[in-house]
Amino acid sequence: MNWIGLDVHLKFSRLGVYVPAEGDLHDGGEVATEREALAARLAEIPGPKTVVLEAGRNCHHLAAMLEVMADQVWIVDPSAVRQLQRQVAKTDRRDASALAYWAGKGALSPIWRPEAPTLNLRELTRGKTSLTRLATRVRNMIRSLLARHGYECPHQDLLGVKAQAWLGRVEIPGYGGIMLATLLELLPLLQSKAEALEKMVEQEAQEHVPARRLMTIPGVGPYLGLAMAVEIGEPKRFATPAQLRSYSGLCPSVSQSGERQSYGRLTKRGNRWLRYAAVLAAQRIASMRYPDPRLKRTLLAAAFRHGRNPAKVACARRLLDLVYHLLIHEEEYQPPKAWVA
C-alpha cells in the first residue's frame, strides 16, 4: 500500500508519497485542488494507494471526490499530526510528507466519516442554529443602537405589535437612523427563515429513530433531539460515555504532577455543535419544574459548590451519559423508579 499525504488549500494542494516497500518518502509537488488535476496526478502514482488528509472545513466533500481516485481515503485529526511532527519549521511539503509517513507507519488512524444522509441533516440543524444566533445578534445590535441614542425599548419581543409600534415612533438622526431601519428590515427576514427551518427540523425529527428516542428525555425537543443524534452519528464508535463527553469538549483540562492534580477550563476540543446542543438542553432542564431527578441532583449539587454556569456544564455532561445509554441500548427514556424503604 502506497500512502499519499494531501495538504489541502483553497487553490492548490501539496502531495507527499510514502512507499513502505522501498522505505522512500517522496515530494509529490503541488497540484490544483480540482477534480481533473487531482485525478491526473493520482493516476501517476502506482496502486494500491491510500490518500490521507486532515479534518477541515471541506474534508468530507474532498474525501467523497477522492474515493474514485484511490483505494482508500483517510481523514485524520490535525492535532494528532502536530504531536507527531515535533519540528520548528512548518511548510506545506513537510505537512504533506508527515501525513503520508505517519499514516504508513500506523501512527495515525482515520476518524469516523458520517454518511451522506447524516451530513445532510447536519446542514439543517447547524443552519437553524446559525440563523437563530444571527437573529439574536441583530436583536442585540438594535438594543445597543437604541441605548447609544438614549432609548430603551420597554418591550421584550422586538417583533411584537407593541414593540413595533414603539420603534415606529423612535427618531434617530443621521446614519444611526439608517442603521436602525436596516436592522429592523433584517430581523423579520431572519426570524421567518429560522422558523421555516425549525418546521423542517420538527418534520425530520419525527422520521429519525435515534432523535425520537432522545426526544423522550424531559426537556429535549425536536431540535435538540435531532441535533444531538446527527452530531453523535454512530454511537457504537464510542466505547464509553466518557469518550462521548470528551468528543463534545465538555471535559475539564487536567494537570497532574505527583500527588498534585488540578482541573482547569473546558478543553473545548471536539464537536462544538454537540457541545452547544448539550448545554442548551441543560439550560432548559434547569428551568423545568419536573426534569429527570438525576440531572436535577447533578445541577443543584454543582450549583451549590461552583455556581449556576458550571452547574449547567455538569448537567450537560450527565445528560450526555444518559443520551449515550439510550442510543447504545436503543431504548426510550424511562424515569427512575421511586425508592421505597
Image: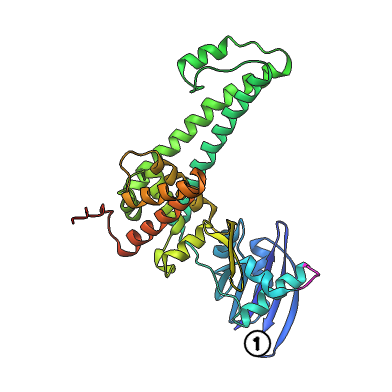
- The residue drawn where x is 52% and y is 17% is 154
Q: Point out residue 148 in the picture as x, y percentages from the top left corner.
A: 68, 20
Q: Amino acid at mark 1?
A: Pro
Quadrant assignment, res 68:
bottom right
265 up-or-down from 180: above or below: below
Q: Nearer the viewer, residue 17 or 126?
A: 126
Q: Nearer the viewer, residue 64 or 332?
A: 332
Please state if 326 lies on the left or on the right of 317 as rendered: left
- The residue drawn where x is 45% and y is 55% is 317
Q: Point out residue 339 in the picture as x, y percentages from the top left corner.
A: 22, 55
Magenta-tinted stretch:
87-91
Q: Point out residue 223 in the picture as x, y percentages from the top left corner.
A: 41, 44
**Residue assigned mark 1:** 20
- The residue drawn where x is 63% and y is 62% is 35
Answer few, some or many: residues within 10 Å of disc 1's Cα (few below 14, many 20 plus, some between 14 and 19): some
Q: Point out residue 104 in the picture as x, y percentages from the top left corner.
A: 62, 81
Quadrant location, the N terminus: bottom right
Residue 209 in view: yes
Question: Within the magenta stretch, is there residue 279?
Answer: no
Q: Please identify the residue farthest to the right as the structure is shown.
A: 89
Question: Within the magenta stretch, is there residue 89?
Answer: yes
Element at badge 1? loop
Q: Nearer the viewer, residue 299 or 120?
A: 299
Residue 201 in view: no
